[in-house]
Amino acid sequence: MNQEVKDKGIYDTNTWAFFLMLCLATLTLLVVKKTFVENETTAFEILDQRGEMGMFHAINALQYLTIPVVYLFKFTIISFTIWMGCFMFGYRITYAQTWKVVMISEAIFLIPEFLKICWFLFVFGDYNIFDIRAFYPFSLINFFDTETLPARAFYPLKALNIFEVAYWFILVYGIHTVAQKKKNIAYAIVFSSYVLFFLLWLGFYAMIYK
């Protein structure tokens, strides 16, 4: 009897329908952050009074329009890295399945964006644009004084956060669920491919940043 393996839950979702929902959710959060958080800072108020906001509106529009492109590029690179790890460990999973796992796992990063908006709207008062760009919920950067922190350390310390770590484990769960094999091999795949390259990238960034 050639019976398909057990139901894969969210991983049976239509890929492009989920991609569209992810883009729309990201767009919504970005618009809210730009409108109600970033544009309310003193710097933006001064530019608005001077009539010099045109360039920033154009940049914002470009950010909105490029969301799908950025996601496609990011998912393609990460999926290829993990798919090669699957191939090395003999895990039978297609590139399209890996791409879907990566895409669905990305949804975890909507949470910190939502928390960031809530933080500046309801908790942290009298902020400036530097405060907004330096803040990332539950990240290592919150343990340092950002005013004295070297510029090269900002991105790595923001990137190392609880949501990134959760992303690793969601990837493991996704690979395990889709391939229907032992979870310990899925851990080995994700940590020896994506996690390893992610940490190497952070180290490389910190070294070359000027």
Image (cartoon, grey):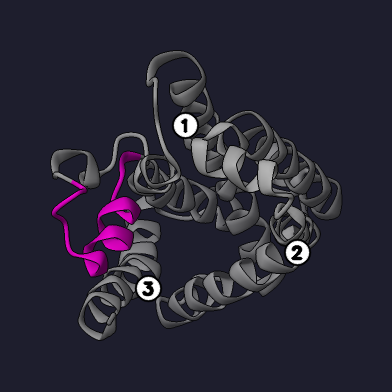
Residue closest to the eye, 42 or 68: 42
Q: Is 147 part of what is drawn in magenta?
A: yes
Q: Position of residue 200 (x, y in %)?
A: 27, 76
Q: Quadrant of the C terminus?
A: bottom left
Badge 3 is on which residue? Answer: 193
Instruction: Tell me whether the residue at label 1 lies in contact with that at label 2, contact meaning CB atoms closer than 8 angstroms.
Output: no
Q: What residue type is labelled 1?
A: Lys
Badge 2 is on which residue? Answer: 66
Q: In the rendered image, which quarter is residue 65 located in? A: bottom right
**Mark before the other along the chain sequence, 1 or 3:** 1
Residue 116 badge: 1
Q: Distance between the residues labelled 3 and 2?
A: 27 Å
Residue at point 79% right, 56% down? Answer: 61
Q: How many C-alpha atoms fall within 10 Å of the one at disc 2: few (<14), some, or many (≥20)?
A: few
Residue closest to the eye, 84 or 45: 45
Residue closest to the eye, 129 or 210: 129
Q: Bounds of the magenta span?
A: 146-162
Q: In this view, does 14 lie to the left or right of 87?
A: right
Circle nearer the viewer, 1 or 3: 1
